[in-house]
Amino acid sequence: MALLEVKNLKKVYTTRFGGNHVQALSDVSFSVEEGEYVAIMGESGSGKTTLLNILAALDKPTSGEVLLNDKDIVSISEKEISAFRRRNLGFVFQDFNLLDTFSLQDNIYLPLVLSGTSYSEMSNRLRPLVENLRIKDILTKFPYEVSGGQKQRAAVARALITNPKLVLADEPTGALDSRAADDLLQIFSQINQEGQTILMVTHSTKAASHASRVLFIKDGAVFHQIYKGSLSNEAMYQRISDTLNIIATGGDRNE
Ligand SMILES: Nc1ncnc2c1ncn2[C@@H]1O[C@H](COP(=O)(O)OP(=O)(O)O)[C@@H](O)[C@H]1O
Ligand SMILES: [Mg+2]
């Protein structure tokens, strides 16, 4: 059974007065197996963030189905949603979403505090993350006192501390310099090797070349996908670039 199953997802945004319709997703279907590392690419405006928001149950689709761990998250009740999200999902947002009035440590603890976890359990979980992410020395600092890369690492720790079944990341390297981006990609590869499932939206070919599969979205649907298999990062990079060129020049995958 797949960890995540997305079936015929459609999202039409309507303006407040119902005048304008934007079809962000027309018919998206794919599934993700437990332990996969999937990157999603597509031009700006192709519906990537819309898709991620729906997968995170932050937004509802116009129609279609999303099964996470066999649970239909489209029809889940408002009451259940926060707890389900905390138990199953970790998010890494492009703008980090850290609270400025909390230290980094308190930011990282927040999802566990919300689910009533004991302090000793929280600190047990924090320890290995702090090592891996190299954030021990900055835990007592506030978000405005650290660099973008450090904020990003704290955001990753916060996403992982609940040990989520699925990690969702929207352009996680978008705001990072190349060294911090490399660090983050290494962390993602490592947690994936340790069994965590990752779904990452990215416009970085380099970031995507680390994933085990890349899905390309165009005109609100999955246009193509590439499996990494035994390809090197460099060979994967080349195949992704070629596919992006085809998409940009309006090519047809069947040609
Ligand atoms: N809240 C919204 N209301 C109306 N239109 C939206 C909204 N969010 C996104 N859109 C539109 O939906 C399309 C897909 O947007 P988005 O999912 O943000 O794309 P991407 O993340 O791939 O850049 C775009 O045309 C965008 O303008
Ligand atoms: Mg986006």
Image (tube, rainbow, N blue to C red):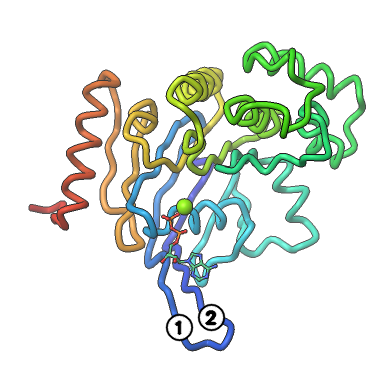
Depth order, front residue of 33/126? 126
Q: Residues within 10 Å of mark 1 (few under 14, many from 20)?
A: few
Where residue 33 appears, as percent x and y from the top left, is: 47, 36
Q: Mark 2 falls on what kind of element?
A: loop
Instruction: Say if mark 2 contacts mark 1, CB within 8 Å.
Output: yes
Dot 2 beta carbon under 8 Å from ligand 1: yes
User: For mark 2, what is the residue?
Assistant: 15
Where residue 76 appears, as percent x and y from the top left, is: 69, 61
Query: Is 101 drawn above or below residue 21 in the view shown?
Result: above
Depth order, front residue of 213/13? 13
Q: Quadrant of residue 23?
A: bottom left
Query: For the image shown, how many numbered marks are present on the structure?
Result: 2
Name the kind of residue labelled 2 in the image.
Thr
Earlier in the chain: of badge 2 and badge 1, it is 2
Residue 76's label in the rendered image is: none
Where residue 11 appears, as percent x and y from the top left, is: 47, 68
Q: CA distance from mark 2 to mark 1?
A: 6 Å
Q: Quadrant of residue 163?
A: top right
Q: Residues within 10 Å of mark 2 (few under 14, many from 20)?
A: few
What residue is drawn where x is 48% and y is 33%?
173
Q: Could you tell whether 177 is left or right of 116 in the image?
A: left
Q: Could you tell whether 220 is left or right of 73 in the image?
A: left
Q: Quadrant of residue 91?
A: top right
Q: Mark 1 falls on what kind of element?
A: loop
What residue is drawn where x is 58% and y is 83%?
16
Name the kind of residue labelled 1 in the image.
Asn
Dot 1 beta carbon under 8 Å from ligand 1: yes
What residue is drawn where x is 81% and y is 16%?
124
Q: Could you tell whether 154 is left or right of 125 in the image?
A: left
User: For mark 1, what is the residue?
Assistant: 20
Query: Is 99 drawn above or below residue 182 in the view shown?
Result: below
Where residue 140 appears, as percent x and y from the top left, is: 82, 22
